[in-house]
Amino acid sequence: MSSTRDPRSHRFGALWLALLVGALVTLGACSATRLDKTAQDDADATSDDVVSTDDMTTEDTVSAVNLNGPYPYQKLSDYRFFVGEIRNLFPNDGVLPYEVTAILWSDNATKDRFFVLPPGTHVEFGTQENWVFPV
């Protein structure tokens, strides 16, 4: 009896990897208003809810993140990086896809890579320098 692997399992793993990377990048951009929300607020939230950080400064954003404390959300899905049915997810607004120049081989798994930037910010980069992301 031959063993076959479901090709969708690779896509599912890649999705969770993308969500994890997005969550780690986004932790530096969490706003104080979002951290202060209660569990009931999260239960009442819909995918249409948007937290605006347009009027916040970098100092406000950085001070709102406790890097030594618990994560703001208990589940990765609570960050709402993607919308749609679990089998057909799409990046939410503000979740930006990117591709790497040298793709790392890992068991022929396909990967989608994403990051989230705070509104009104950008990444500084050059051909010889390290990228500088907003905090």
Image (cartoon, rainbow, N blue to C red):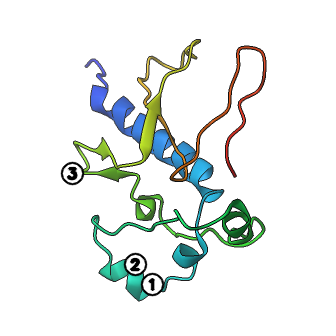
- Left or right of 74 in this view: 8: left
Disc 3 packing (10 Å; few <14; some 14–19; many ≥20): few
**Residue type indicated by callout 3:** Glu
x, y percentage for residue 50? 38, 66
Residue visible at 32% across and 76% down? 45
**Residue type indicated by callout 2:** Asp
x, y percentage for residue 12? 36, 39
Looking at this view, is 84 or 32 the one in front? 32
Looking at this view, is 115 or 8 the one in front? 115
Q: What separation in Å lies between label 2 and label 1 (alpha carbons)? A: 5 Å
- Left or right of 94 in this view: 90: left
According to the image, label 1 marks what residue?
A: 39
Residue 6 is at least partly visible in this image: no
According to the image, label 3 marks what residue?
A: 85
**Label placed on residue 42:** 2
Q: Earlier in the sequence, mark 2 or mark 3?
A: 2
Provide the secondary structure element on which disc 3 rests. loop
x, y percentage for residue 72? 58, 71
Q: Are marks 2 and 1 in contact (CB under 8 Å)?
A: yes
